[in-house]
Amino acid sequence: MNKRILFSFILLAALTLIFLLLGVSAGSADISPAELMRVLMGRSSDGTAALILLKIRLPRTLAAFVLGGALALSGYMLQTYFHNPIAGPFVLGISSGARLMVAVTLVLAARGALRLGSALMAGAAFFGALISMMAVLLASSKIKNMSMLVVCGVMIGYICTAITDIIVNFADDSDIVNLRGWSIGSFSGMKSDQLIVAAAIVFISLAASVFLSKPISAYQLGESYAVEMGVNIRAVRIAIILLSSLLSGCVAAFAGPVSFVGIAVPFLMKMLLGTAKPLCMIPACFIGGGVFCIISDIIARTVISPSELGISTVTSVLGAPVVLMIMLRKKKNNA
């Protein structure tokens, strides 16, 4: 490992620690740093502070880190699959497909047709993400131009969003409250059992991605080269599809739609590391995505405190300029 990569991971580790502490500290209730440390060490006598920090802020901050990492890793996997730096779960409509199935599940659960639980939400989101992914893959088999493929993904996303909006409009008032709160995107209200389910899904997917780093590296160099190296292209493609769908679906299930993270973070990590090697990029994208979403969440809950912004609003403001930078750089390289 060269010095730049080593320094990059040390920096990411330091940023993770700093923003985890800032994420737990940020909020409308004023809790001193000394009291925060006492609560974290289990030495606090203030029950209210302990409740706020351990039951509300800590699960929320950890959820932002885990789900943000999942979204960035999903984006990196999709960019690898399509060989396109602006391919991401939000742009390709995969997040919208997951959002649609979660909306259907919430309505059915509210009417007693289903028993709502973390596993059911995750399963519904994965199913919706997988359907959208299949639609994108079908389009990719007919359309070889990557720019047009991205347009197709955007259209798939709009279709899913339109159907979701129809469901919201025809839902009962009690359903709409849950749907509208979830549809703006937020890490708030994350419970410990939900966090455990989300973390299990994400970390298993992360481990599988690291395990696949060598065949993915060969795949990046071209299919002919990968075949010569003994890589099963079909198996690698299926694995990438399933992992990216599972990761983006998990985020949609527990946090709602979160935009631009899957595109912006892999680009930033590639600039930071100075390499595109999957063995380095996979953990860097996960950590970078987690830090990015913690920062976004802190902004979302402090800018107009005690009210909150939707997390997707903040990630769009922070991530959209990066996407523009990618497109301008790509145009300059093609010129």
Image (tube, helix red, strand yellow):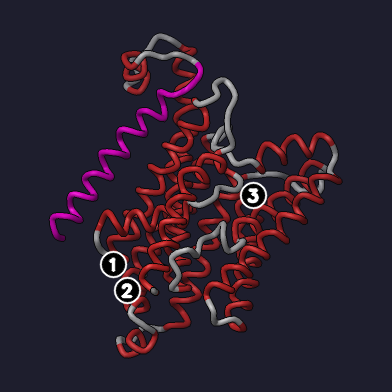
Check if residue 2 falls in the magenta segment: yes
Q: Are marks 1 and 2 in contact (CB under 8 Å)?
A: yes
For disc 3, the marked residue is 121
Taking the spot 33% from the left edge, 79% from the top edge, the residue there is 221
Counting the numbered discs, the total is 3
Dot 3 falls on a residue whose secondary structure is helix
Taking the spot 36% from the left edge, 71% from the top edge, the residue there is 333
In this picture, residue 95 sits left or right of residue 81: right
The correct choice, above or below, for 181 with respect to 106 in the image is: above
Q: Disc 3 marks which amino acid?
A: Met
Most foreground residue, 300 or 30: 300
Dot 1 falls on a residue whose secondary structure is loop
Most foreground residue, 152 or 197: 152
Marks 2/3: CA distance?
Answer: 33 Å
Q: Disc 1 marks which amino acid?
A: Lys
Taking the spot 42% from the left edge, 37% from the top edge, the residue there is 295
Q: Position of residue 65 (x, y in %)?
A: 42, 42
Nearer the N terminus, badge 1 or badge 2? Answer: 2
Q: Which residues are magenta?
A: 1-28
Q: Are marks 2 and 3 in contact (CB under 8 Å)?
A: no
Q: Position of residue 134 (x, y in %)?
A: 62, 72
For disc 1, the marked residue is 277
Taking the spot 29% from the left edge, 57% from the top edge, the residue there is 271
The quarter of the image holding the C terminus is: bottom left
Query: Which quadrant of the structure image shows residue 3?
Result: bottom left
Secondary structure, magenta segment, majority class:
helix
The correct choice, above or below, for 249 with respect to 301 in the image is: below
The correct choice, above or below, for 252 with respect to 174 in the image is: below
Marks 1/3: CA distance?
Answer: 33 Å
